[in-house]
Amino acid sequence: MAEHTEPPFNATPVKEREEPLDVQAFMAELGNSREFQVNGVGARQGAEAVFCTLARRLSDGEDRKLFQALGKDGIGAILGACAIHRGTSHAKRMDRAEFITDVADHLHIPMDQALRVLTVVFTAIRDRLPDDEVAAVASQLPADLADLFRRPV
């Protein structure tokens, strides 16, 4: 028969995560992605790489709108932290290859793998945005990246 044992008196409870639930769900979605796992990319690391490149590509006004739509204390905080990487120029023009190269360089992975990670992050972002904000962000991306960002039809 199994013995009943009392837990030790000095046991400390497990500390709750300090992240809001929307951030936890977002990070879990990214971290559970096969693309992230295969490339050894951490959820936060991958999100930051894509958000930093996206922040450099968007106009200042659109950057702020996206930040607010994602929640300044939630997922948007990841984007907000990356806004400093833009420097003095806003809405840096870059094509698809340069965008993907920036993400690949940030993550130290090949470009083809960076595109896969980028696609996972774009999907996770757009699923949390209203349609008008998805359209606004897509309008500022190169056409071939805008198609990745828009909702599937």
Image (cartoon, helix red, strand yellow):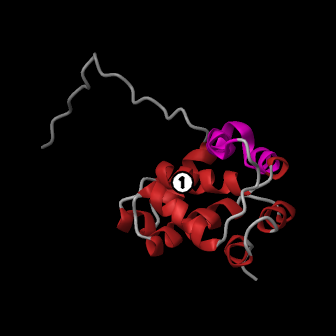
What is the chief secondary structure element of the magenta stretch? helix
The percent coordinates of residue 20 (x first, y second) are 61, 39
Residue type at numbered disc 1:
Ala
Say above or below: 112 vs 27. Answer: below
Q: Dot 1: few (<14), some (14–19), or many (≥20) neighbours within 10 Å?
A: many
- Report whether 65 appears left or right of 17: right
Q: Secondary structure at mark 1?
A: helix
- Report whether 75 appears left or right of 48: right
Say above or below: 18 vs 129. Answer: above
Q: Which residue is mark 1?
A: 49
The percent coordinates of residue 151 (x first, y second) are 74, 74
The percent coordinates of residue 126 (x first, y second) are 71, 63
Residue 79 falls inside the magenta stretch: yes
- Report whether 41 appears left or right of 3: right
Question: Can you say which quadrant of the picture contains the C terminus?
Answer: bottom right
Count of numbered badges drawn on the protein? 1
Residue occupying the far top of the picture: 10
Q: Which of the 4 image quadrants contains residue 94?
A: bottom right
Q: Closest to the observer: 109 or 24?
A: 109
Residue at image location 54% in from the left, 54% down from the top: 49
The magenta segment: 63-87
Residue at image location 42% in from the left, 69% down from the top: 34
Residue 1 falls inside the magenta stretch: no
- Report whether 71 appears left or right of 48: right
Q: Closest to the observer: 39 or 22?
A: 39
